[in-house]
Amino acid sequence: MICVVAALSCTTHSGESGSEPIDAAEQAYADGHYRRAQNVAEELLTGPGLEGLDVGELCRVSLLFVRLGDATGNEDGNTAVAARALSAAFAIDSDSTARYIGSLSLDDRARMSIVATLANRGNGLDSLIVEPDSIY
């Protein structure tokens, strides 16, 4: 768990005001305080919203909501918010967003690929996520 938070902390983000609540929510999640992490993440959305966040921050928020959905059982609601954040990241810089997803662990990448499909439905960006080869 701590390695995941450390890896997320190494991602590029501008240090703007959006990073502090994301850092706090990620730390709460890493500590197993899922309700607190959910509350902090939701406050971020009701406060400044997604508009002031950069690509790295949007990706982190999206991944956080995906993980919280798994941890809290609120997969539908959190997946919708994760898709909204990832859609905003793709709109800013689709290449950086795809690189971020590609740099995740296999489990996180699988979850985020599903969110990316939802986020990009109808805008032609589905091809940015390269699925691994498989034998049918």
Image (cartoon, rainbow, N blue to C red):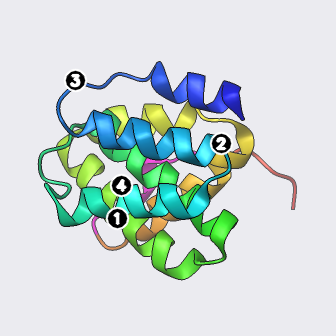
Q: Which residues are magenta?
A: 123-130
| Tag 1–tag 3 contact (CB < 8 Å) | no
Q: Secondary structure at mark 2?
A: loop
Image disc number at residue 14: 3
- Residue 31, percent from left and from top: 65, 42
Task: Tell me the amino acid under the disc marked 4.
Answer: Leu
Residue type indicated by callout 3: Ser
Residue 95 visible in this rendered orientation of the protein? no
Q: Residues within 10 Å of mark 2 (few under 14, many from 20)?
A: few
Quote the CA–CA distance across marks 2 and 4.
Answer: 24 Å
Q: Residue at x 50, y 50 (%)?
A: 63
- In reply to whether residue 124 is colored magenta, the answer given is yes
Q: Nearer the viewer, mark 3 or mark 4?
A: 3
Give above or below for 56 relative to 129.
Answer: above
Which residue, given by chain and number where applicable, does mark 1 sit on?
A: 42
| Residue 94 horizontal side relative to residue 129, left or right | left
68 lies above or below 59:
below
Q: Position of residue 11 (x, y in %)?
A: 43, 23
| Rendered position, 54 above or below 78 | above
Residue topped by disc 2:
31
Element under disc 3 = loop
Q: Is residue 56 visible?
A: yes
User: Which label number is shown at residue 86?
Assistant: 4
Alpha carbon distance from label 4 to label 1: 15 Å
Q: What separation in Å lies between label 3 and label 4 (alpha carbons)? A: 17 Å
Name the kind of residue labelled 2 in the image. Answer: Asp
Residue 53 image label: none
Query: At 47% across and 62% down in the image, what residue appears?
Result: 38
Which of disc 4 and disc 3 is earlier in sequence? 3
Residue 97 in which image quadrant? top left
Give the secondary structure at mark 4. Answer: helix
